[in-house]
Amino acid sequence: MNSNDEDLQKNIESGHYSNEDELDVKAYQEVFARLRKKPDMYLSADFADKIVVRVQEKQRRSASRDFFWLACGVSLLIVALVVAFVLSGFKPTLGFLKGMSAYAGLFAFGIAFILFLNRLEKKIIPRPE
Amino acid sequence: MIDDRALVRKILEGDTQAFRLLISQHQRLVAHMIGRLVKSQEEREELCQDVFLRIHDKLGEFSFQSRLSTWIATIAYRHAINHLRKKKLIYSDMPAEQDFNALFVEVESPESLMSEKDMDAFVFRLIDELPPQYKTVLTLYHVEDMSYPEICEVMAMPEGTVKNYLFRARKLLKEKVKKYLGKEELL
């Protein structure tokens, strides 16, 4: 670094300059005065609104994508289950299922109740986004 | 006045008003940085929006190792630099000092200097011609009043480099303004 300019910059920044008539000092004073000025840059009045809308759109897209992959996964599982039933010759009247078949309504109610509780929990407890 | 930790927690919990508050607190910082680095008026506001979207995405990773404003400035700086690189508007590194001085200080004739009537506009135009790294150091130091360690963090540069850029940028501007003032005194 040039030590003369370095000293000048330090002195002008701290407000201690010896010779105001010197052209270097004048030039630095002009430069420093402009450097402190904020650049011209204006944002629209609804700048924050536009960002919030974009964030919400992004979250909606992400939720739709998650739902799509969940639906794909569930569909795949059902297909796999059907294929397994067909290939293995599975019959619902075999083994312990034979004894349980009398309580089919109770099982259906159990599954529906669990799904209901799950939905209720989602509505009552707010989830962090 | 809500502190940064509480503000970040609220945003992570999905509080939109808290995010609006963060935007209003830091939009000037982001606008100054983008405004200094990107010349196209049309692209500026969209880039500022992109910066805040990125902040929203990455806020969960902010660990309060630095001030929130420093972290936001870092994102704004990287975003602007990436944009300039995509547009091939800057070199990957600083141009050689000698070449740059010649380009910056000697390219204009005295006549064109004398046509500059407004010193504000003149100096701002000179700043516009500086490399992005110089412009960023000048903005963070003089406009945003950031300390050297904060500027180092934003720009991922050692303190010596930041001080050197600041010195060289101010000297380049001084040389140009000196020529202008010299001509004015002759009149």
Image (tube, rainbow, N blue to C red):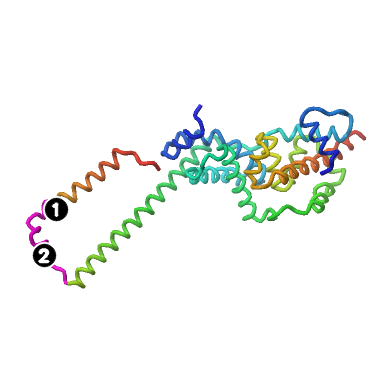
Of the two numbered discs 2 and 1 on the same chain, state the one appearing first in sequence.
2
Numbered disc total: 2
10 Å neighbourhood of mark 2: few (<14), some, or many (≥20)? few
Q: Residue B187 at x, y = what percent?
A: 91, 34
In the image, which disc is placed on residue A95?
A: 2
Q: Residue B160 at x, y = what percent?
A: 73, 45
Where disc 2 sits, the SS reads helix
* In the image: residue B64, left or right of residue A100: right
In the image, which disc is placed on residue A107?
A: 1
* In the image: residue B106, left or right of residue B150: right
- A104 drawn magenta: yes
Task: Name the residue nearer the viewer: B144 or A7.
Answer: A7
Q: Residue A58 at x, y = what percent?
A: 44, 48
- A57 drawn magenta: no
Residue at mark 2: chain? A
What's the residue at 86%, 46% (across, down)?
B109
Q: Is residue A92 visible?
A: yes
Segment colored magenta: A89-107
Where disc 1 sits, the SS reads helix
* Kind of residue at disc 2: Gly
Magenta stretch, main secondary structure, is helix
Q: Is residue B187 visible?
A: no
Residue at mark 1: chain? A
Q: Residue B155 at x, y = what percent?
A: 65, 46
What's the residue at 78%, 35% (across, down)?
A31
Q: Are marks 2 and 1 on the same chain?
A: yes
The CA span between labels 2 and 1 is 17 Å
B55 up-or-down from A93: above or below: above
